[in-house]
Amino acid sequence: MIAQQSTTIPPLVSGGVMLTYRCTNACKHCLYRCSPRHEPHFAPPEQVDATFAALAREPRLSGVHLAGGEATLDWDRLVYAIQSARKHHVTLDYLETNASWCRDETTARAGFERLQQAGLNGVLISASLFHNEFTPLAYTKAAVRAAWDVFGRGGVLIWTPDVLSRMDRGLDEDRRHTLKQSCELLGIDLDSGELWQVHGYLTPGGRCAERLQSGIRRLPAEAFEGSSCKGTLASTHHFHIDPFGNLYSGHCPGISVASIENLHPGISEASHPLFWRLWEGGPFAVWSDLASDFRPDASGYISKCHFCLELRKHLRATASGRFGELRPDEFYR
Ligand code: SF4
Ligand code: SF4
Protein backbone atom coordinates (compact mmCIF):
# COMPACT_ATOMS: atom_id res chain seq x y z
CA MET A 1 0.00 0.00 0.00
CA ILE A 2 1.29 3.47 -0.89
CA ALA A 3 2.01 5.55 2.21
CA GLN A 4 0.29 8.91 2.43
CA GLN A 5 3.05 10.78 4.22
CA SER A 6 5.50 12.95 2.42
CA THR A 7 8.53 14.94 3.35
CA THR A 8 11.16 17.17 1.77
CA ILE A 9 14.78 18.23 2.08
CA PRO A 10 15.17 20.79 4.92
CA PRO A 11 16.69 24.24 4.23
CA LEU A 12 20.36 24.03 3.23
CA VAL A 13 22.86 25.13 5.86
CA SER A 14 26.42 24.48 4.66
CA GLY A 15 27.95 22.51 1.84
CA GLY A 16 29.95 22.28 -1.34
CA VAL A 17 29.54 23.06 -5.02
CA MET A 18 31.32 20.43 -7.11
CA LEU A 19 32.48 21.78 -10.45
CA THR A 20 33.54 18.39 -11.89
CA TYR A 21 33.92 14.71 -11.04
CA ARG A 22 37.22 14.65 -12.90
CA CYS A 23 40.36 14.67 -10.80
CA THR A 24 44.10 14.28 -11.22
CA ASN A 25 43.96 11.74 -8.40
CA ALA A 26 41.95 8.61 -7.70
CA CYS A 27 42.35 8.61 -3.93
CA LYS A 28 41.33 5.39 -2.21
CA HIS A 29 39.26 7.29 0.36
CA CYS A 30 37.28 9.41 -2.14
CA LEU A 31 33.61 9.40 -1.15
CA TYR A 32 32.66 10.86 -4.55
CA ARG A 33 34.66 8.27 -6.55
CA CYS A 34 36.42 11.02 -8.51
CA SER A 35 39.30 10.16 -10.83
CA PRO A 36 41.06 11.02 -14.11
CA ARG A 37 38.81 8.48 -15.84
CA HIS A 38 35.79 10.76 -15.59
CA GLU A 39 34.71 12.86 -18.54
CA PRO A 40 36.27 16.35 -18.59
CA HIS A 41 32.82 17.74 -17.81
CA PHE A 42 32.70 20.99 -15.85
CA ALA A 43 29.52 22.69 -14.73
CA PRO A 44 28.79 25.19 -17.56
CA PRO A 45 28.48 28.91 -16.72
CA GLU A 46 24.69 29.01 -16.95
CA GLN A 47 24.44 26.11 -14.51
CA VAL A 48 26.94 27.69 -12.14
CA ASP A 49 24.79 30.83 -12.17
CA ALA A 50 21.62 28.80 -11.61
CA THR A 51 23.30 26.97 -8.73
CA PHE A 52 24.30 30.15 -6.92
CA ALA A 53 20.93 31.77 -7.67
CA ALA A 54 19.23 28.77 -6.04
CA LEU A 55 21.62 28.87 -3.07
CA ALA A 56 21.01 32.59 -2.64
CA ARG A 57 17.33 31.80 -2.01
CA GLU A 58 18.17 29.45 0.90
CA PRO A 59 17.17 31.25 4.11
CA ARG A 60 19.56 29.40 6.47
CA LEU A 61 22.63 29.07 4.27
CA SER A 62 25.85 30.05 6.06
CA GLY A 63 28.26 29.42 3.17
CA VAL A 64 29.61 26.93 0.64
CA HIS A 65 32.97 25.72 -0.54
CA LEU A 66 34.05 24.99 -4.11
CA ALA A 67 35.25 21.50 -4.92
CA GLY A 68 35.68 18.86 -7.60
CA GLY A 69 37.10 16.43 -8.34
CA GLU A 70 39.89 18.92 -8.75
CA ALA A 71 38.40 22.30 -9.58
CA THR A 72 41.72 23.76 -10.84
CA LEU A 73 41.55 21.47 -13.88
CA ASP A 74 39.68 24.35 -15.54
CA TRP A 75 40.89 27.69 -14.22
CA ASP A 76 38.51 29.77 -16.31
CA ARG A 77 35.47 27.87 -15.05
CA LEU A 78 36.78 28.05 -11.49
CA VAL A 79 37.26 31.81 -11.70
CA TYR A 80 33.77 32.09 -13.19
CA ALA A 81 32.31 30.14 -10.26
CA ILE A 82 34.01 32.41 -7.72
CA GLN A 83 32.68 35.49 -9.50
CA SER A 84 29.21 33.98 -9.76
CA ALA A 85 29.11 33.27 -6.01
CA ARG A 86 30.03 36.89 -5.35
CA LYS A 87 27.47 38.17 -7.85
CA HIS A 88 24.75 36.19 -6.09
CA HIS A 89 25.98 37.17 -2.61
CA VAL A 90 26.63 33.57 -1.56
CA THR A 91 29.45 33.29 0.99
CA LEU A 92 32.36 31.23 -0.30
CA ASP A 93 34.15 29.58 2.61
CA TYR A 94 37.07 28.15 0.65
CA LEU A 95 38.25 26.23 -2.41
CA GLU A 96 39.25 22.63 -1.82
CA THR A 97 42.38 21.59 -3.76
CA ASN A 98 44.70 18.58 -3.84
CA ALA A 99 47.69 20.81 -4.76
CA SER A 100 48.59 18.64 -7.77
CA TRP A 101 49.19 21.82 -9.78
CA CYS A 102 51.56 23.39 -7.19
CA ARG A 103 54.85 22.18 -8.68
CA ASP A 104 56.67 25.07 -6.96
CA GLU A 105 55.83 28.02 -4.74
CA THR A 106 55.85 30.55 -7.59
CA THR A 107 53.27 28.58 -9.56
CA ALA A 108 51.15 28.07 -6.46
CA ARG A 109 51.27 31.74 -5.51
CA ALA A 110 50.31 32.86 -9.03
CA GLY A 111 47.33 30.50 -9.02
CA PHE A 112 46.10 31.55 -5.59
CA GLU A 113 46.53 35.25 -6.46
CA ARG A 114 44.37 34.81 -9.54
CA LEU A 115 41.66 33.19 -7.44
CA GLN A 116 41.93 35.83 -4.75
CA GLN A 117 41.54 38.59 -7.33
CA ALA A 118 38.34 36.87 -8.48
CA GLY A 119 37.02 37.05 -4.90
CA LEU A 120 38.21 33.92 -3.08
CA ASN A 121 39.25 34.35 0.56
CA GLY A 122 40.52 30.94 1.55
CA VAL A 123 41.60 27.45 0.58
CA LEU A 124 41.55 23.96 2.00
CA ILE A 125 44.67 22.02 1.06
CA SER A 126 44.38 18.24 1.23
CA ALA A 127 47.22 16.36 2.93
CA SER A 128 46.81 12.62 3.45
CA LEU A 129 48.54 9.35 2.68
CA PHE A 130 45.84 8.78 0.05
CA HIS A 131 46.67 12.04 -1.73
CA ASN A 132 50.38 11.30 -1.46
CA GLU A 133 49.92 8.33 -3.80
CA PHE A 134 49.44 11.00 -6.50
CA THR A 135 50.77 14.31 -5.16
CA PRO A 136 54.33 14.57 -3.79
CA LEU A 137 54.62 16.18 -0.38
CA ALA A 138 56.78 18.99 -1.85
CA TYR A 139 53.74 20.12 -3.88
CA THR A 140 51.54 20.09 -0.78
CA LYS A 141 54.09 22.11 1.20
CA ALA A 142 54.56 24.61 -1.66
CA ALA A 143 50.79 25.03 -1.75
CA VAL A 144 50.62 25.69 2.00
CA ARG A 145 53.44 28.28 1.99
CA ALA A 146 52.02 30.11 -1.03
CA ALA A 147 48.50 30.04 0.36
CA TRP A 148 49.71 31.49 3.68
CA ASP A 149 51.31 34.35 1.70
CA VAL A 150 48.19 35.05 -0.32
CA PHE A 151 45.32 34.35 2.08
CA GLY A 152 47.02 34.70 5.46
CA ARG A 153 47.17 31.92 8.04
CA GLY A 154 43.47 32.36 8.85
CA GLY A 155 42.52 31.71 5.23
CA VAL A 156 44.25 28.33 4.95
CA LEU A 157 42.86 25.05 6.21
CA ILE A 158 45.24 22.08 6.00
CA TRP A 159 43.33 18.81 5.98
CA THR A 160 44.89 17.57 8.14
CA PRO A 161 47.88 19.25 9.84
CA ASP A 162 48.67 16.13 11.91
CA VAL A 163 49.03 13.95 8.85
CA LEU A 164 51.03 16.62 7.05
CA SER A 165 53.59 16.85 9.85
CA ARG A 166 53.75 13.06 10.19
CA MET A 167 54.44 12.78 6.44
CA ASP A 168 56.99 15.56 6.69
CA ARG A 169 58.90 13.65 9.35
CA GLY A 170 58.96 10.33 7.53
CA LEU A 171 58.50 10.61 3.76
CA ASP A 172 60.72 11.75 0.88
CA GLU A 173 58.97 14.95 -0.16
CA ASP A 174 60.01 14.72 -3.79
CA ARG A 175 58.25 11.49 -4.66
CA ARG A 176 54.90 9.82 -4.48
CA HIS A 177 54.41 6.81 -2.23
CA THR A 178 51.96 3.98 -2.57
CA LEU A 179 49.83 3.50 0.52
CA LYS A 180 51.82 0.39 1.36
CA GLN A 181 55.11 2.28 1.11
CA SER A 182 54.02 5.25 3.21
CA CYS A 183 52.50 2.98 5.86
CA GLU A 184 55.77 1.04 6.08
CA LEU A 185 57.84 4.23 6.31
CA LEU A 186 55.56 5.77 8.96
CA GLY A 187 55.03 2.61 10.98
CA ILE A 188 51.30 2.36 10.28
CA ASP A 189 49.77 -1.11 10.25
CA LEU A 190 47.82 -1.25 7.01
CA ASP A 191 45.95 -4.39 8.07
CA SER A 192 44.69 -3.30 11.47
CA GLY A 193 42.44 -0.39 10.56
CA GLU A 194 45.06 2.06 11.88
CA LEU A 195 44.75 4.09 8.67
CA TRP A 196 41.21 4.96 9.77
CA GLN A 197 42.50 6.25 13.10
CA VAL A 198 45.24 8.32 11.43
CA HIS A 199 42.65 9.83 9.07
CA GLY A 200 39.85 10.17 11.59
CA TYR A 201 37.46 11.89 9.17
CA LEU A 202 36.96 8.99 6.75
CA THR A 203 33.39 8.21 5.75
CA PRO A 204 32.78 4.51 5.03
CA GLY A 205 31.06 5.01 1.68
CA GLY A 206 32.07 5.56 -1.95
CA ARG A 207 35.54 4.40 -2.95
CA CYS A 208 36.56 4.45 0.69
CA ALA A 209 34.27 1.50 1.37
CA GLU A 210 35.38 -0.23 -1.79
CA ARG A 211 39.14 0.13 -1.27
CA LEU A 212 39.88 0.55 2.44
CA GLN A 213 38.36 -2.54 3.98
CA SER A 214 41.49 -4.01 5.47
CA GLY A 215 41.32 -4.45 9.24
CA ILE A 216 37.72 -3.25 9.53
CA ARG A 217 35.11 -5.50 11.12
CA ARG A 218 32.50 -6.72 8.65
CA LEU A 219 28.82 -7.25 9.35
CA PRO A 220 26.23 -9.25 7.42
CA ALA A 221 23.55 -7.32 5.52
CA GLU A 222 20.97 -8.53 8.05
CA ALA A 223 22.76 -6.54 10.77
CA PHE A 224 21.45 -3.33 9.20
CA GLU A 225 17.76 -4.25 9.51
CA GLY A 226 15.79 -1.42 11.12
CA SER A 227 18.56 1.14 10.63
CA SER A 228 16.87 4.13 9.00
CA CYS A 229 18.87 6.77 7.11
CA LYS A 230 16.47 9.61 7.84
CA GLY A 231 18.89 11.47 10.12
CA THR A 232 21.63 11.46 7.50
CA LEU A 233 19.48 12.14 4.45
CA ALA A 234 17.75 15.03 6.25
CA SER A 235 21.06 16.63 7.18
CA THR A 236 21.99 19.69 5.15
CA HIS A 237 25.09 20.67 7.13
CA HIS A 238 27.43 19.07 4.59
CA PHE A 239 25.36 18.91 1.39
CA HIS A 240 26.88 18.89 -2.09
CA ILE A 241 25.57 20.06 -5.44
CA ASP A 242 27.26 18.13 -8.23
CA PRO A 243 28.37 19.37 -11.69
CA PHE A 244 25.01 18.29 -13.13
CA GLY A 245 22.98 20.23 -10.59
CA ASN A 246 22.03 17.23 -8.39
CA LEU A 247 21.76 17.83 -4.66
CA TYR A 248 23.23 15.27 -2.25
CA SER A 249 22.18 15.65 1.34
CA GLY A 250 23.98 13.96 4.23
CA HIS A 251 27.06 12.16 2.98
CA CYS A 252 25.22 10.22 0.34
CA PRO A 253 26.60 10.84 -3.16
CA GLY A 254 24.83 8.97 -5.94
CA ILE A 255 21.40 9.41 -4.27
CA SER A 256 19.49 12.51 -5.25
CA VAL A 257 15.86 13.61 -5.26
CA ALA A 258 16.50 17.33 -5.62
CA SER A 259 18.27 19.56 -8.09
CA ILE A 260 19.01 23.24 -8.54
CA GLU A 261 15.65 23.58 -10.33
CA ASN A 262 13.89 22.52 -7.12
CA LEU A 263 15.98 21.93 -3.99
CA HIS A 264 12.97 20.96 -1.88
CA PRO A 265 10.64 18.68 -3.85
CA GLY A 266 7.84 16.71 -2.23
CA ILE A 267 9.16 13.23 -1.42
CA SER A 268 6.81 10.29 -0.97
CA GLU A 269 6.82 6.57 -1.43
CA ALA A 270 5.03 7.03 -4.73
CA SER A 271 7.29 9.73 -6.14
CA HIS A 272 10.68 8.46 -4.91
CA PRO A 273 10.32 4.83 -3.82
CA LEU A 274 14.00 4.13 -3.29
CA PHE A 275 14.84 7.33 -1.41
CA TRP A 276 11.72 6.88 0.68
CA ARG A 277 12.79 3.41 1.75
CA LEU A 278 16.27 4.61 2.62
CA TRP A 279 14.72 7.41 4.64
CA GLU A 280 12.36 5.04 6.47
CA GLY A 281 14.32 1.81 6.78
CA GLY A 282 17.80 2.23 5.26
CA PRO A 283 19.32 -0.08 2.65
CA PHE A 284 17.86 -3.16 4.34
CA ALA A 285 14.36 -1.90 3.44
CA VAL A 286 15.50 -1.29 -0.15
CA TRP A 287 16.82 -4.83 -0.31
CA SER A 288 13.61 -6.34 1.14
CA ASP A 289 11.13 -4.32 -0.87
CA LEU A 290 12.84 -3.40 -4.14
CA ALA A 291 15.79 -5.69 -4.74
CA SER A 292 15.00 -9.17 -3.47
CA ASP A 293 17.21 -10.63 -6.24
CA PHE A 294 20.29 -8.98 -4.67
CA ARG A 295 22.62 -11.54 -3.13
CA PRO A 296 24.66 -9.88 -0.37
CA ASP A 297 28.36 -10.58 -0.04
CA ALA A 298 28.70 -13.54 2.32
CA SER A 299 31.77 -11.92 3.88
CA GLY A 300 29.67 -8.93 4.94
CA TYR A 301 30.16 -5.16 4.73
CA ILE A 302 32.30 -2.69 6.62
CA SER A 303 29.34 -0.33 7.10
CA LYS A 304 25.73 0.29 6.24
CA CYS A 305 26.88 2.71 3.53
CA HIS A 306 29.09 0.00 2.00
CA PHE A 307 26.08 -2.34 1.83
CA CYS A 308 24.01 0.55 0.41
CA LEU A 309 26.57 1.28 -2.31
CA GLU A 310 26.78 -2.34 -3.48
CA LEU A 311 22.99 -2.59 -3.46
CA ARG A 312 22.69 0.60 -5.50
CA LYS A 313 25.27 -0.58 -8.02
CA HIS A 314 23.21 -3.76 -8.40
CA LEU A 315 20.02 -1.76 -8.97
CA ARG A 316 21.74 0.48 -11.49
CA ALA A 317 22.86 -2.62 -13.39
CA THR A 318 19.58 -4.52 -13.25
CA ALA A 319 16.65 -2.13 -12.84
CA SER A 320 17.23 -0.27 -16.15
CA GLY A 321 16.73 3.26 -14.95
CA ARG A 322 13.72 2.46 -12.76
CA PHE A 323 15.04 4.52 -9.87
CA GLY A 324 15.75 8.09 -10.93
CA GLU A 325 17.14 8.79 -7.46
CA LEU A 326 20.29 6.84 -8.37
CA ARG A 327 22.09 9.56 -10.31
CA PRO A 328 24.16 10.72 -12.02
CA ASP A 329 25.78 8.17 -14.34
CA GLU A 330 29.10 9.87 -13.60
CA PHE A 331 29.06 8.71 -9.97
CA TYR A 332 28.41 5.08 -10.92
CA ARG A 333 30.90 5.03 -13.80
S1 SF4 B 1 39.64 12.89 -2.54
FE1 SF4 B 1 39.86 14.83 -3.65
S2 SF4 B 1 41.84 14.67 -4.67
FE2 SF4 B 1 41.25 12.60 -4.07
S3 SF4 B 1 40.20 11.73 -5.87
FE3 SF4 B 1 38.64 12.63 -4.54
S4 SF4 B 1 38.34 14.69 -5.32
FE4 SF4 B 1 40.29 13.95 -6.12
S1 SF4 C 1 23.26 3.76 3.94
FE1 SF4 C 1 23.03 4.85 2.00
S2 SF4 C 1 21.41 6.36 2.31
FE2 SF4 C 1 22.06 5.59 4.31
S3 SF4 C 1 23.54 7.07 5.07
FE3 SF4 C 1 24.69 5.46 4.01
S4 SF4 C 1 24.90 6.10 1.86
FE4 SF4 C 1 23.33 7.39 2.84
Image: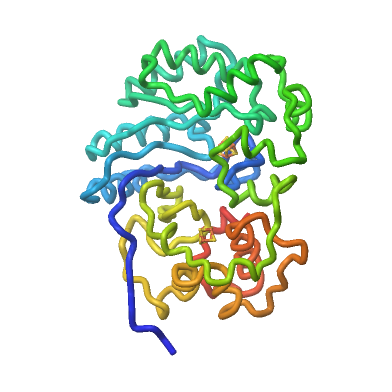
* Residue 43 shown left or right of residue 266 in the figure: right
Q: Residue at x 27, y 45 (%)?
A: 61
Estimate the x, y position of residue 207 in percent, counting from the top left.
64, 48
Q: Residue at x 68, y 36 (%)?
A: 194
Estimate the x, y position of residue 142 in percent, counting from the top left.
54, 14
Q: Residue at x 36, y 36 (%)?
A: 81
Estimate the x, y position of residue 161 in percent, counting from the top left.
52, 23
Q: Nearer the viewer, residue 41 or 238?
A: 238
Question: Looking at the figure, which quarter contains the C terminus?
Answer: bottom right
Question: Looking at the figure, which quarter contains the N terminus?
Answer: bottom left
Estimate the x, y position of residue 162 in percent, counting from the top left.
56, 23
Does residue 50 sit above or below 230 in this rendering?
Answer: above
Q: Picture quarter containing residue 331?
A: bottom right
Q: Nearer the viewer, residue 212 or 145?
A: 212
Does residue 238 sit above or below 279 in this rendering?
Answer: above
Does residue 25 sit above or below 294 in this rendering?
Answer: above
